[in-house]
Image (cartoon, rainbow, N blue to C red):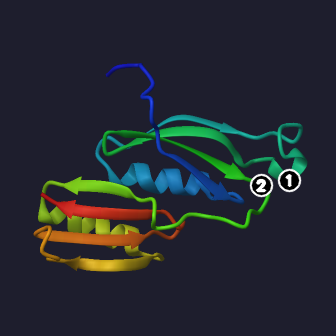
Amino acid sequence: MSTVQPKVTPFLMFQGKQAEAAITFYVSLFDDGEVLDLKHAGPDGPGGPDAEGTVHLASFRAGGQVIRAIDSAPVHDFTFTPSISLYVTCESEAEIDRLYAALSEGGQPLMPLGDYGFSVKFGWVNDRFGVSWQLNLV
């Protein structure tokens, strides 16, 4: 595998202390899932004592894609939105069913698995962390 950093990498910012749980969940969903780097904030780092234990910077692989993530100690007026989503091409019905079920648990289905005319089987869901996923069976 190449060690060259891609020019464009998805970057997820979680609020509070959710990044590590989300990363653990995401890498468990994919055969190639792997935490590549995970650094926690200390009491004297950015964000001060309130940020201690949050994910300062992480990178992980899921479905062949390297994704970076952080926790944000300050609460923002914005969070994830379905207008940006992670799109997963599934190679089997078993795979799309498994991913949809796992991502839907505690989340919010936006489009139930079905045939929408542009795909044999497609589903869209916001997971329990608020990240939006589109799943497509090829």
Q: Residue furthest top?
A: 3
- Residue at 81% x, 49% y is 51
- Residue at 41% x, 59% y is 85
Residue 50's place in the image compared with 132, above or below, is above
Contact (Cβ within 8 Å) of mark 1 with mark 2: yes
- Residue at 38% x, 63% y is 133
In terms of depth relative to the viewer, which is nearer, 122 or 100? 122
* Amino acid type shown at disc 2: Ala
Residue 81's place in the image compared with 14, above or below, is below
Counting the numbered discs, the total is: 2
The residue carrying mark 1 is: 50
* Amino acid type shown at disc 1: Asp
Q: Marks 1 and 2: which is nearer the front?
A: 2
Residue 30's place in the image compared with 109, above or below, is above
In the picture, measured across the screen, residue 28 lies left or right of residue 129, that is left
- Residue at 87% x, 42% y is 43
Q: Which mark is residue 73?
A: 2
Q: Position of residue 5 (x, y in %)?
A: 45, 24
Pick whichever of labels 1 and 2 is earlier in the sequence: 1
Dot 1: element: helix
Q: Position of residue 41 (x, y in %)?
A: 76, 41
Q: CA distance from mark 1 to mark 2?
A: 7 Å
